[in-house]
Image: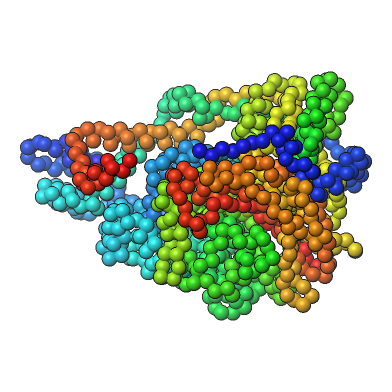
Amino acid sequence: MMIRLSISAAALAGVCAASLFATTVAAEDLTTDIGTLDKETADKVFPSKPPYSPYAGRNFPTRPYFGDTHTHTSYSMDAGAFGARLGPKDAYRFAKGEEVIASSGQRAKLSRPLDFMVVADHSDGMGFFPQLIGGDAGLLATPQGRRWYDEINSGKGAQAAIDIVTSFGKGQMPKGFPTPGTPAYRSAWRETIKAAEEANEPGRFTAFIGYEWTSNAGGNNLHRNIIWRDNGAKANLIEPFTTLPPLGSPNPRDLWKWMAMVEEKTGAEILALAHNGNLSNGRMFPIIESFNGKRIDREYAENRTRWEPLYEATQIKGDGETHPFLSPNDEFANYERWDKGNLDLTEVKKPEMLEFEYVRSALKNGLKMEAELGVNPYKFGLVGSTDAHTGLTAVEEDNFFGKTSSSEPSADRAMHPFVKTDKAVIMGWETTASGYAAVWATENTREAIFDAMKRRETYATTGPRMAVRFFGGWDFETADANNRMPARVGYAKGVPMGGDLNNAPNGKSPSFLIAALKDPIGANLDRIQVIKGWVGKDGQTQERIYDVAVSGGRKIDADGRSRTSVGSTVDVASATWTNTIGSGEMITVWKDPDFDPALRAFYYVRVIEIPTPRWTAYDAKYFGVKMPAEVRMTTTERAYTSPIWYTP
Amino acid sequence: MLFAFYGFVGKRNAEAPEKIVVSASRITNLGDGFARTWRRPPSEQELQGLIEDYIRDEVFYREGRAAGLDRDDVIIRRRVRQKMEFLAEDLPEPSDEQLKAYLVSNPERFRSDDQITFRQVFLSATRRPNTIESDSKRVASVLSSGDAAIDTAALGDPFLLGDEFHNVSATKVTNQFGESFAKGVFAMDKGRWQGPVSSGFGQHFVFISERVSGGLPPLDDVRPAVRREWANTRRLEAEQKLYASLRERYEIVVEAPPSKAASAENGR
C-alpha cells in the first residue's frame, strides 16, 4: 500500500536550507516593521475604528468549498450501458463520504466528504438505460434497441455503449427513445430532483439540481451542464432541454433561449458551464460559428457571457488549460493531453483547431472580440469536475474509480482502449484522475455557492484540495503578504478571482495578493505562477508566464521565470513520495512589470504541486502489473484560478 | 402484478384447477389507472372492457407460462426481477415510533458534531525552515507564562485561512488541517494554551475558548435525514429479505464449464 510520509519540521529544516521562496524572504525582511506597516494599511483600509470583534460585519468567504459539478449515474444512457448501476441517490451518498458498493462490486469511499455536488445526467435519453435494460417493448421492437439489449445482456455493454454514443452523435436513435413529455422521461427527471432534495443539507452538504445538455453534432463536443440555484419546486415545473430536434437543438443559442424561458416562466435562476473543448475539434470557443458559418455577433457574445459564467477546465477526459502547440514556452503545458480527435474519434485533430478549444487561447480571443463587439463572449471563470460515469466522484490518484463502470479499478483497465476507431485510439491509461471545483462561498448552501459561481469566485483543481487566494488591485504592497488576515486585506484593497479592474490610476500597475496552501493531506507546492494574456497594440493576442513564488530557495530570474525544476521524490515502484521538497504554503504580492494601461489584459494564477505518483502507478503497485513504457507514471497536479480582467 | 405474483408462487406445485379472481380492489385499481390517463373515471362500459382485458392478459400470461414461454426469455426474466425489486422498494410511510427507534439505534449517523471555537499561534515550516524547533520552544514558554496581556497573534506567522475558527466540527478541522491535527486539537482541554500540534503546514499552539458537545438531536430536528436513512436501510433489507425468501425455494446448481474450472484451479 502507499505510504505518505508526513515530515517533521526538523526534517524539513534540514532539507530546505534556505528560505523557501524568494518573495517571502523579501516580506520577512520587513518583519520588524510589520506592526507599523500593518497599522498604516489598516488605517487606510478601515478609516474608522473597527469593532472589537474582527468578525463583526464580515461577510466575505473564509474557506473554499470543494465539489463536483459533473457526475453521471446509471440514468445517463451511456453510463448505464457501460455498467453503471448506481443512481443519483447513491452518487450523493458517496459524495457525502459514505461507503458504497461500486457497480463493479468493490467497496468505495472518499478520503473525505465533498462539500457539494451536481448529479448531471444527460438530458437526451434521461432514463433511457433503465428503460432499455427493463426490456421496454417499444425499444426492443427496433433493430438497434434489440441489438444493444442483447449486447448488454451478453456482457458486451462497452460495445453497446460506444455504439449508443456514436448513434446519438449522428442523431440516429431508435424510435421509443425517451424524450421530454413521455412518462419514462418525466419519472427520471423527478427521481433526479428527488435525490438532490433528499441529499441537500444546508450548511453541511449542498446537492444541486442539474443535468447535462450533450450537444454532440458530428461527434464534436459542445456539452454544457445546467445548474439550478433553486429547489425542486421550481425545477419540477420544467423538463430539461435536449439536443435532438424537434424538441431539442444542438445549437447553444437555442439552449440560451431555453434558459431565458425557464427563468422567465418558472422564476428559477440557472447557469450553464461547458467542458471538453479539447474534444470539440475547433468548435468550443469559436470566432466563426459552426452552425451558420458567420462571425460571432454581439447577440451570441451577450448570451454566452450571461448564461455561461464558468468553464470546466479539467476533467477525466483530459486537461483543457492550454496545449504545447499554443503555448510553446510553457513547460507545464503538456499536461494530460487529449488531442487525437473529437469525442468519438470520427474526425482527427488538426493543429489549427486547437486555438478554439483551450481556456487560455479562448480568454485571449475573448479580449480581441470584446474590442470588436463591445462584449467579451469568453469571460468565464474556471472550475474542474470529474465527468465520472460511475456515480462515484472519485478522482484522487490513489482512489481513482475511472471514467466508466467498466474502468473501475482492475488489473487491466489501463491497457483497455477507452475509444478506438479506424482513425485513432485513446487508451484507458490516458484517462485523467481529475478534477474538482473549488468555490469561495460565504456558506455551504445552494444559494451561496451558486452566487459565488455567478461572480466566478472559483478555481479548478486536478484533484487535490489546495486553498488558493487571488486578489487584484492597485495598492497591494509587499507587507500585505505578512498581514495577519490576508483575506481581509485582499477584499478591502482589491477584487477576488473572477473580478474586474479598470480605471488604472495614473502611473500605477496592477498588483496582486496571491496565496496558496497545500491540500492538508496532499503534496507540497512547487510554485505559483501568474499567466497573463493581452492584446497588443498591433491587435495580436499575446501571453506570458511569470513565476511569482517558488519553493526551495530557487531564484526567480530577472525575466520573471524560475527555470530550475523542483525535482522529484516519487518512487514509482512503491507509488510513494515525500514532502521533503516543495513548500506547504506560499503567499506573495506581485506587481505586473510590463503593464500598459491602454491594453486589455487578463491574469490568472496557476499553482503547481511537486510531482506525485499518477493513478497508473497506484494501479501497477496494487495489481502487481507492469505498465508499458509509454504510460505516464507521475503527475504534477495543479490549480487554475478564474482570471481577473483589466479593461482600459 | 402483485396478484399475479402470489398466484404464481403460491401455486407452484399445486394441481388445483386454475381460477382467475378479479377482486373488488383489482377493479378499483383498473379504474384508477384509467382515470390517471384520461383524467376522468371510466364509464360502466369502459370498466367492463378493462376487466375483460385484464382477464385476457391473465389467461395469456398463465397459459404462456404453462407453455414455458417465460423460461428462456431474458426480457421476461429481467422485467420480473425489476418488478420484484420494485415491490421491495415500495415502502409504506414510517410512523414516528419507527423513526424514533431508528434514530436511537443508529446514533452515530445523526449525532450532531462536537464543535469547538479556537484560536491559534501558527509557526510556519515554510517561513522558519531552520528555526521552527527553537521558535516553538520559545513560544511555548511565553504562552505558559499565562500573561493575559501578551499579544499572542504577534508570536506567530499569518495563516491563509485565519487565526480564529468559530464553531468548527472535527470534519471541518480535518478538511483544513488534516486528520492528526484535528484529533490532537479535539483531545485538548479548553481555557488554556496548549501545543504545539503539527500539521502539514507547520506547528500550531491552540487555545480552545468554547466547546459544544454534540448529541443526539430530537427527531423533529432531523426528521428528513432519519426518514431518508430509514427508507434506504429498509429498501436494502426488504430487497435482501424478499430475495432470500424466494431463493430458499430453489435448489441452485451452477454448472461451471469444465475448461474454466480447470483454468481457475491452475490460475494461482
Above or below — where is B118 with respect to A261? above
Residue shown at 71%/44% (left/top)?
A583
Residue A592, quarter of the rendered image:
bottom right
Residue shown at 43%/32% (left/top)?
B230
- Tell me where residue A646 appears, x and y as whole percent: 77, 63
Any part of residue A279 in sight = yes
Quadrant where the image shows the C terminus of chain A: bottom right
Q: Tell me if A162 is positioned left or right of A259 in this view.
A: left
Q: What colour scheme does the image use?
A: rainbow
Q: How many marks?
A: 0
Residue shown at 85%/47% (left/top)?
A26
Any part of residue A190 in sight = no
Above or below — where is A317 with respect to A623? below
Residue shown at 54%/55% (left/top)?
A632
Foreground residue among A592 and A610: A610
Above or below — where is B246 with respect to A526? above
Q: Tell me if B195 is positioned left or right of A479 in this view.
A: left
- Tell me where residue A53 appears, x and y as whole percent: 81, 34
